[in-house]
């Protein structure tokens, strides 16, 4: 995880509609940037739907919600449509942003193969682009409320 007080790394990724979105597009508002492993899985669906249900409250507090995974634009579009998600999902198939935000960990399989997997993590970025909260190993169902409480 990146340290609180550091400048959030800039990025540009395609959203679920194929539109390029940059972190700098959100300057002047808080950003809840959450990283999740995979569209359509139970934990990721629970997390996304919680953010979706609470999305009006995030907007009332001046915060944008952005989900990031290595899934494709097309996968994100299906995920968004199936669950009626009102916020932006960004595709990071090359995992450049996932790596920049330090949310990958190495793990060893039972056969001894070393792999890297994404740790479900969430950052709160302030209006100037500074990381003000960093949470790793978040619980899917609790994450949205946790972040809403962080915003205050």
Image: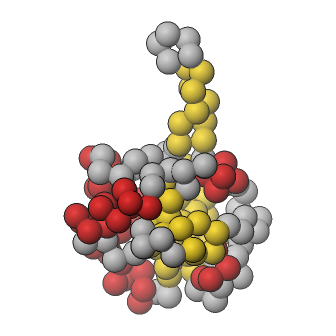
Front-lying residue, 52 or 146: 52
Rendered position, 56 above or below 68 = below
Q: Which residue is drawn at the image coordinates 64% and 69% (left, top)?
A: 12
Tell me which corner region of the image, top left, top right, bottom left or bottom right, holds residue 108. Answer: top right
Rendered position, 115 above or below 152 = above
Q: Which residue is drawn at the image coordinates 47% and 12% (left, top)?
A: 110
Provide residue 84's location: percent of width, then percent of height: 25, 72
Front-lying residue, 69 or 15: 15
The answer to whether residue 86 is left or right of residue 27 is left
Q: How is the image coloured?
A: secondary structure
Q: Which residue is drawn at the image coordinates 34% and 84% (left, top)?
A: 56
Rendered position, 42 above or below 144 = above
Q: Residue furthest right?
A: 6
Question: Is residue 9 something one can see in this rendering?
Answer: yes
Q: Residue furthest left?
A: 82
Provide residue 130's location: percent of width, then percent of height: 71, 72
Tell me which corner region of the image, top left, top right, bottom left or bottom right, holds residue 149. Answer: bottom left
Tell me which corner region of the image, top left, top right, bottom left or bottom right, holds residue 83. Answer: bottom left
Badge count: 0
Provide residue 60's location: percent of width, then percent of height: 41, 89
Provide residue 47's location: percent of width, then percent of height: 34, 58
Question: Is residue 48 something one can see in this rendering?
Answer: no
């Amino acid at each position: 995880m990146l340290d609180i007080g550091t400048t959030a790394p800039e990025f540009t990724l395609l959203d679920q509609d194929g539109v390029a979105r940059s972190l700098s597009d959100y300057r002047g508002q808080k950003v809840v940037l959450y990283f999740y492993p995979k569209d359509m899985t139970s934990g990721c669906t629970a997390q996304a739907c919680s953010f979706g249900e609470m999305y009006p409250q995030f907007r009332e507090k001046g915060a944008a919600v952005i989900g990031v995974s290595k899934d494709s634009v097309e996968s994100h579009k299906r995920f968004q449509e199936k669950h009626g998600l009102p916020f932006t999902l960004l595709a990071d198939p090359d995992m450049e942003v996932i790596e920049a935000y330090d949310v990958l960990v190495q793990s060893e399989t039972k056969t001894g193969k070393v792999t890297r997997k994404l740790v479900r993590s969430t950052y709160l970025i302030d209006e100037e682009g500074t990381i003000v909260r960093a949470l790793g190993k978040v619980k899917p169902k609790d994450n949205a409320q946790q972040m809403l409480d962080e915003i205050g």
